[in-house]
C-alpha cells in the first residue's frame, strides 16, 4: 500500500505489523551521531514534526553541482535504542526506518505518540538508492561527515515493511518467541541427535 | 608483477558488485522456497533485484563494503611486501572510484582515513605452496553480520551444551536464534570447532572461502552441516527475520586441535551479500582465471 506525505498520526495508526508500504515524500537520514546530538539537546534548523527518520549512512557523490546517492541501505537500528523514544516524543517523529528492529522502549513510544517502525531490506543498497529521486539538502555535514550527516531525501515508492506498529505489536518479538519455542521442539527430536 | 594493481582493482570491483554463481543459485532456491505474497518472498525479491542492479552498474551490492580481507597463496620466494604495497594502492583507488565505501575508522578518535587504509585494514593472510602460480582470494564482510558472529566455550550451562558434537550443534543453533534478522539473513555460517580464541575465529572465517555446494570431507562434520541447515530453516526466522523458510543458505564446518582445557566453537556469520571472489595470476600479475 501507499504511504504518502504528509505523514499524519492518523495514517500511521492505520498501519499494522506486516503491512508492506511504498513511501513517497521526504525522508531524513540520521544515525549514531545525529541521535546522540539530538539527545544531548542539539538544535536543528528545520522541524522534524510529522517526519520520518531513516537509519542510513548513504554513499553520496557530488555530481553536476548537486548530490547523488549511489548506495543507501538501512543500518542496524538497535544502536539508537537509548535515544529513539525520547526523540520520537520530543520532535514528534511519525516513522523510523531501519533494519533489525528496536526494543521495548521504542515500541512503547510508538504506541504512545503514534509512530511506526519500518524495516527496509538490509543490504539492498541499490534498490533503495533508486527510490531516491532527489537530495533536497544536507545538515551537519561539516560536523559529522557524509555517512553521519542528515540528508533530506525526496523518495518515490521507497519500499519497507511495518515491523513495529502504533498498537504495541512487534514482528521481531513475535518471530523471536516463535523461533525460540520451535528450537526447543527441534532439539528434542531423535532424528537430530548427533 | 607490473599488472598486479590493475588486477586487484578488478578483483575489488567484481567482488563488491557481483555475487559468485554458487551464492546466486542458493539465493534463487531460497526465493522459490518462500510462499507467494509472503514477507519472506518480498525480502528475497528485493534482494534479487538488488543483485541485478549492482551487477549491471558495477556499484556496491551493499553500502557496507566490509572488512577487506585478502587470502594469498604464493610460491616460495614470493615478495609479500611488494604485494601488500600494490594491494594497498589498489584498495585506495577502489575507494576513490566508489567500489568501496570509506570504511576504516580510528578506534580511539573516530577519524575515518577515507582510503580504507590504516592499522589492521586491509587484512592479509599469506600462505606458501608448492605450485608456481599465485592465487588471491578476497572476502568483503560487513559489520552487521560480523556483529552477530559468536564464540562459545564448552561446556555451556545456559545451553546445556557439553563437549561433544551435540553441544556444538546447540551452539550453532543458538547463534542463529540470537542473530534473528540482524545479520541480514539468509545467512551462511563459517564454523570452527577447537583452536584457541584467535585461531578459532580465523579458521571459521576461512571456511567462507568454500563454495556453498560443497560438503565437509569428514562424515561427522558433513552431518553437522546438513543438520544445522535443516534445523535452522525450520525455525521460521526467514529472510531478514521477517518470518519464513530460508534462514540459512549453508554451513561450512571445520575443526582444529585444541588444548585439553578449552573447547571453543567459533562462528563467523555471513550475510546474504556474501561477497567472495578470487583470481589466479600469471607471472606479470595479470588475471589468468577467476576462481568462483
Ligand atoms: S550485514 Fe551484509 S547485507 Fe547487511 S548491511 Fe551489513 S554488509 Fe550489508
Image (spheres, coloured by chain):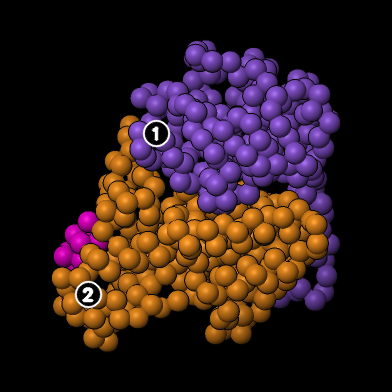
Chain colours: A purple, B orange
Q: Who is closer to the viewer here, B256 or A93?
A: A93
* B149 vs B212: above or below: above
Magenta region: which residues? Answer: B78-89
Q: Residues within 10 Å of mark 1 (few under 14, many from 20)?
A: few
Q: Is residue B272 left or right of residue B167?
A: left
Q: Is residue B23 left or right of residue B11?
A: right
Q: Quadrant of residue A63?
A: top left
Q: Who is closer to the viewer here, B242 or A162?
A: A162
Q: Which mark is residue A66?
A: 1
Mark 2 vs mark 1: give the one in front: 1
Visible residue check, residue A156: yes
- Residue B107 locus on image (x, y percent): 36, 38
- Residue A114 locus on image (x, y percent): 77, 23
* A178 vs B110: above or below: below
Q: Is residue B285 left or right of residue B209?
A: left
Which residue sits at x=27%, y=52%? B92
Per the image, the residue denoted by label 2 is: B285
In which quadrant is the N terminus of chain A drawn? top right
Badge 2 marks a residue whose secondary structure is loop
Q: Chain of mark 2?
A: B
- Residue B198 locus on image (x, y percent): 42, 59
Overall secondary structure of the magenta section: helix
Q: Residues within 10 Å of mark 2 (few under 14, many from 20)?
A: some
Visible residue check, residue B157: no
Amino acid at each position: 500500500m501507499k504511504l504518502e506525505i504528509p505523514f499524519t498520526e492518523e495514517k500511521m495508526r492505520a498501519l499494522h505489523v506486516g503491512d508492506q508500504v511504498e513511501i513517497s515524500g521526504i525522508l531524513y537520514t540520521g544515525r549514531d551521531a545525529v541521535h546522540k546530538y539530538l539527545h544531548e539537546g542539539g538544535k536543528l534548523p528545520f522541524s522534524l514534526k510529522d517526519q520520518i527518520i531513516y537509519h542510513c549512512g548513504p554513499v553520496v557523490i557530488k555530481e553536476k553541482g548537486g548530490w547523488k546517492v549511489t548506495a543507501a541501505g538501512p543500518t542496524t537500528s538497535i544502536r539508537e535504542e537509548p535515544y529513539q523514544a525520547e526523540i520520537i516524543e520530543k520532535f514528534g517523529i511519525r516513522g523510523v526506518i531501519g533494519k533489525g528492529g528496536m526494543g521495548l522502549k521504542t515500541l512503547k513510544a510508538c504506541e504512545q505518540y503514534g509512530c511506526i517502525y519500518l524495516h527496509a531490506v538490509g543490504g539492498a543498497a541499490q534498490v533503495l538508492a533508486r527510490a531516491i529521486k532527489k537530495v533536497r539538502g544536507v545538515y551537519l555535514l561539516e560536523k559529522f561527515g557524509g555517512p553521519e550527516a542528515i540528508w533530506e531525501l525526496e523518495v518515490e515508492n521507497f519500499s519497507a515493511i511495518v515491523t513495529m506498529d502504533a498498537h504495541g505489536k512487534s514482528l521481531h518479538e513475535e518471530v523471536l518467541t516463535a523461533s525460540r519455542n520451535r528450537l526447543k521442539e527441534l532439539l528434542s527430536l531423535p532424528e537430530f541427535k548427533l | 608483477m607490473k599488472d598486479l594493481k590493475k588486477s586487484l582493482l578488478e578483483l575489488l570491483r567484481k567482488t563488491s558488485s557481483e555475487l559468485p554463481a554458487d551464492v546466486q543459485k542458493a539465493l534463487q532456491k531460497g526465493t522459490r522456497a518462500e510462499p507467494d505474497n509472503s514477507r519472506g518472498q518480498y525480502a528475497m525479491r528485493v534482494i534479487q533485484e538488488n543483485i541485478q542492479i549492482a551487477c549491471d552498474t558495477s556499484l556496491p551490492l551493499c553500502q557496507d563494503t566490509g572488512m577487506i580481507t585478502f587470502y594469498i597463496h604464493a610460491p616460495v620466494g614470493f615478495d609479500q611486501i611488494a604485494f601488500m604495497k600494490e594491494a594497498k594502492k589498489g584498495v585506495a583507488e577502489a575507494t576513490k572510484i566508489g567500489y568501496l565505501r570509506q570504511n576504516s575508522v580510528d578506534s580511539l578518535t573516530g577519524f575515518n582515513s577515507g582510503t580504507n587504509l590504516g592499522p589492521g585494514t586491509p587484512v592479509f593472510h599469506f600462505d606458501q605452496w608448492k605450485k608456481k602460480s599465485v592465487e588471491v582470494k578476497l572476502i568483503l564482510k560487513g559489520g552487521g553480520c560480523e556483529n552477530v558472529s559468536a564464540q562459545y566455550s564448552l561446556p555451556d550451562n545456559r545451553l546445556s551444551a557439553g563437549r561433544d558434537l551435540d553441544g556444538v550443534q546447540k551452539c550453532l543453533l543458538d547463534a542463529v536464534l540470537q542473530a534473528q534478522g540482524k545479520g541480514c539473513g539468509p545467512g551462511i555460517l563459517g564454523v570452527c570447532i577447537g583452536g584457541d580464541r584467535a585461531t578459532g575465529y580465523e579458521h571459521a572465517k576461512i571456511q567462507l572461502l568454500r563454495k556453498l555446494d560443497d560438503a565437509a570431507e569428514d562424515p561427522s562434520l558433513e552431518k553437522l552441516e546438513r543438520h544445522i541447515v535443516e534445523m535452522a530453516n525450520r525455525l521460521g526466522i526467514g529472510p531478514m527475520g521477517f518470518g519464513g523458510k530460508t534462514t540459512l543458505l549453508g554451513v561450512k564446518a571445520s575443526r582444529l586441535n585444541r588444548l585439553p582445557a578449552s573447547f571453543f566453537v567459533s562462528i563467523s556469520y555471513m550475510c546474504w551479500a556474501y561477497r567472495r571472489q578470487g583470481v589466479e595470476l600469471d607471472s606479470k600479475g595479470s588475471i589468468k582465471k577467476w576462481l568462483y
